Image: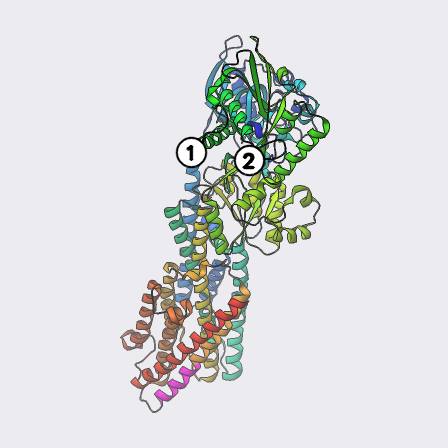
Amino acid sequence: MPESAAAAGSGPVGEHAAVVVPLPGATRSPGPDPAPVTAMTSLQVLRSLDSGPKGLPEQQAQERLTRFGENVLPARRPLSWPVRFVRTLRDPFTSVLLCLGLVSAAVNAWGTAAVTLVLAVVSCVLRSAEEHRADRATAALRELVATTATVLRRSSPDAVPQAREVPVGELVPGDVILLGPGDLVPADVQLLRASGLTVHQSALTGESAPVAKHPLDATDRAGPAVRDAAGAGAGVLARPQSCFQGSSVATGSGTAVVVATGADTRFAAAYDRSARRRGASAFDRSVQGISWTLIRFMLLTPPLVLMANAALRGRGLETLPFAVAVAVGLTPEMLPVIVTTALARGASLLARDSGVIVRQLPALHDLGAIDVLCLDKTGTLTQDRPLVDGSLGRAGEADPQVLHWAAVNALWTLQLADLPAPDVLDEAVLDAWEKRSAQGAPPCLPVEAYDAVAALPFDPVRRLSTAVVRRPGRLGAHVLVTKGAVEAVLERCDLDPAERERLTALADRKTADGSRLLAVARTERAARLGPYTPADERGLSFLGFVSLHDALTPSASDALAVLHRRGVTVKVLTGDHPGTAARACRDLGLPAGDVLCAEEIDALSDGELAGAAGRTAVFARCTPAHKARIVAALRGSGHTTGFLGDGVNDLPALRAADVGICPRNAVDVVRETADVVLAEKDLGAIDHAITAGRRSSGTIAAYLRITLSSNLGNVIAMLGAGLLLPFLPMLPAQVLVQNLCFDAAQLAFAFDRPSSSVLRGPTVLRPRDFLRFITGFGLLNAAADLATFAVLALALHGSPADGQAAFHSGWFTENLLTQALVMLLLRTGRRSAWGGGGGPLRAAAAGLAAVGILLPLTGLGPLLGMSALPPLYYLLLAGVLALYACALGAARNRYERIRGTS
């Protein structure tokens, strides 16, 4: 959109710093007093680089390649599978298991030690393998990126230069390259020649509109405003003579000299700044909180058991294995396996069904925990394609004549100017005129009826285009039709200062409402044979404005509504004009409210920004630093944030967010930095990823609540029984077998599909919530265990069965049956426990109950110190379990009510 480059909607101009020419005698760093490119003409730059318009000889290019190195970004070495495996050992849950295994081995509880250590290793293998697979998938995306550039090279200093394709990595400072529509700019360059050249810099600035570029020498004809923009006072990325790696050519063509490659480019500088280590993610914070809660319980349990038995029963260190077994019984041994399997399974399904790659497994949990999603406007909410709203006369009234003359300009400029690629604004104007013509005959001549005479195509210095046509039957007169940037057209019209000021104010009001404006003017001159030049664009009669807006992404409105229902707040962080951003949001049904601009953000402290960020939906004119600061403020105020970006300008914000998200066509360094890679830049794909994250997190949360509450109840009952009974309430071997049965059944959680209620809002593992849950339900479980003691006393009274072995059998059976009940009732609630869903859990619970009833009756029972129980026990136990199930259901319903109102 070259004609809109200077109109409303242009973005930030980048950082204020000088681009430095790497002098020929330098190595990777320039000399002590390098000459800034912005102070040099094209000829001076070529001389400083010891190059010329014909490019470098091959031999000199090879010498420079050896001196400066390849034109590639500093590589981040991928982690090998063994290194990744070792790093997974630092996971807090895994560390807890390893410590327990070592303690168990220290007290000669080899069975417990073996089980816990095997579970830790299995978890590490699963996690490292899944993340290694994701890294391979991300690396494969690099093959989709173009890797060649067109460069002028000479076989010898006196030879004729030849244009040929060379790998981008072989470009060196001093190379002369050719740029055309669609080309990626392969290095930082300064223009030598250009024709209608505009480039997309959104990967660097976030600015949606292409930016006009021209050689520095052209500013001599451009007037003081453009000369100032090209000088040292302007932002680097706004300087019209420079193009930067990471941008792409929108229209026109050009010849440029390479001034910086590899690590010296601004692209690489942004990449390096983003490489700082990110703080703890939502998953890390949750895991650490829960792990420390478990560690405190486990550290307290063995000393309490030892002291209580020593004080009340006179037992010594012989109870140490039992004390360690109690601590192990409190620990959810399967937690690392369940977490890793649930996340890996969710990531695999997401990659298979939606083409979304999760590069770090914990990022899937964080996706489910996201409550604020930050994104840019262009490519997500809007397409990079303008649409015409209408045409306005001088007084602001609707005037189809303005659109008619704009279409005349667009048609004959496209026909006569021989542009390298059609201008999207011209195409939008012609599309709008064709639609109007199809709706009824407009009171104008068809645009094709005019005879074409000449065209002055859009020029980034003039910021307008002119078509010269002849009306049918009017051989003695030519009509000059001009359209372009409002300021450029107005200054070429015959207007008194008051009228010019009024029209400028009208344009400003329309721009503030989110419109992009093109001004249209014309004049009639006597026919002539000589050529037309920009000097003829004077004394024009102003006609009015053509109003345009960005086309909305078709799926954006529905996707935003779905995210709102999911409890995700969307915030737009853009480099565009505030009116443009606000209008796009309003058109999509996203309340824009008051837009916060960059200068207002700069005036706020971090604390003030945190409050303002929570209230504001749209942030405009944002630089990369602004985006990162906004995301950090939201995260610091307790939100779990996601950021969707695709350009190097988004790297700081991607690093600042809990979850960095990018599409697969993002620049390479962004894909390397992001946690999640989407098949395309689509909010619908993000919704799929969030849904997968919440399902995996819901599974993990359900496992934690059920297992920890059940384990805590068992530990409380075990401590009580140890104090009341003259023998150990359960032998270490029985504790080990019971834990193995629990662990095998709990593996079903990894394959469970949680209820749809987990999709309604962010799923966060909050340690305080878990502590309240497991304490309440753990005490309820302990009450069931104590009731079982009474049942055992009643059933075994007067029984010939061995009291100690029978007690062990009875409690073993009750523990497995209550665990099966808890798995069913606390997962879904009483009303849906026996309905659809939860197939793997129902099967696991049934198997666990069967083992609890049958194992003491088999030949393994006596080997484990258990004996058969009288039938009366089972009848009384059924009554206890029925009461326990009712209490569980009532407590669950009360918990849900309290949680729903909090």
Look at the image and tell me whether residue 900 can be seen: yes
Direction right: furthest residue: 497
Observer-nearest residue: 361 or 223? Answer: 223
Q: Quadrant of residue 812?
A: bottom left
Q: Which residue is mark 2?
A: 208
Magenta-highlighted stretch: main secondary structure?
A: helix
Observer-nearest residue: 601 or 30? Answer: 601
Q: Looking at the picture, how far across and down is residue 97, in whole percent?
A: 46, 61
Q: Residues within 10 Å of mark 1 (few under 14, many from 20)?
A: few
Q: Disc 2, disc 1: CB below 8 Å?
A: no
Residue 18, compared with residue 722, is above or below; it is above
Q: Looking at the picture, how far across and down is residue 163, in whole percent?
A: 48, 16
Look at the image and tell me whether residue 35 can be seen: no
Element at label 1: helix
Element at label 2: loop
Q: Which mark is residue 793?
A: none
Amino acid on which disc 1 is placed:
Glu
Bounds of the magenta span? 786-797
> Horizontally, is 829 left or right of 655 in the view?
left
Q: Which mark is residue 143?
A: 1
Nearest-to-viewer mark from 2 and 1: 2
